[in-house]
Amino acid sequence: LRGQSIHPMVKLHLQNSNIFPNYMHFSQQVTKKLLKQYYWILVMENAHKEYINKLGVNLDSRMFTVREIGLSTPPPEIDMPDPTGSEHKEDYNENYRELFTILEKEIPRIANFLTDEIMKLEDRDNQEQDI
């Protein structure tokens, strides 16, 4: 099932930032089959987690918002700013500045967390093979 193309305001901001300047993006329907293909699921908002949970796939220990993954205590605000749907250019400008600031901080932390988790999974798999 082919989804929606990228929102025109999002595309404009990405092109202005030299990100995916010629990339043709389409959303993809979230299904149980799709979710089972991935070990970790990162979402932008808690509402996304709630929607996915309604699909009946148990992802409690593997699904996180971008801001909470790898933290023992979630931050006070776990949702990422999302201007999608707004027709006001100012909303996009403000939200993109905030998004990029958050992501510059969060991406290295997430990468370190995932690297550590992958190493733990590999160690566990190696130990199981030794048995």
Image: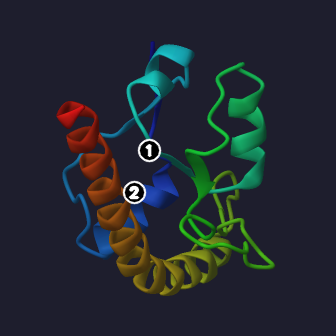
Residue 129 picture quarter = top left
- The amino acid on which the numbered mark 2 sits, given as a three-letter code, is Lys
Q: Where does the N terminus fall, quadrant-wise?
A: top left
Element on which disc 2 rests: helix
Q: Is residue 113 above or below residue 44?
A: below
Q: Which numbered disc, 2 or 1, marks the residue that appears first in the sequence? A: 1
Residue closer to the observer: 5 or 49: 49
**Which residue was labeled with disc 1?**
6
Per the rendering, the mark at residue 11 is: 2
- The amino acid on which the numbered mark 1 sits, given as a three-letter code, is Ile
Q: Is residue 10 left or right of residue 116?
A: right
Residue closer to the observer: 43 or 121: 121
Q: Is residue 14 above or below residue 95?
A: above
Per the rendering, the mark at residue 123 is: none
Residue 98 picture quarter = bottom right
Tell me residue 36's x, y (percent).
Answer: 46, 23
Visual colour scheme: rainbow
Task: Say which residue appears at 50% left-offset and 87% top-offset.
Answer: 101
Q: Is residue 90 left or right of residue 20?
A: right
The crowd level at tag 2 (other Cα within 10 Å; few <14, some 14-19, many 20+) is: some
**Dot 2 and dot 1 residues touching (CB under 8 Å):** yes
Tell me residue 94's x, y (percent).
Answer: 62, 82
Estimate the spatial distance between the alpha carbons at disc 2 and disc 1, rounded to whole Å: 6 Å
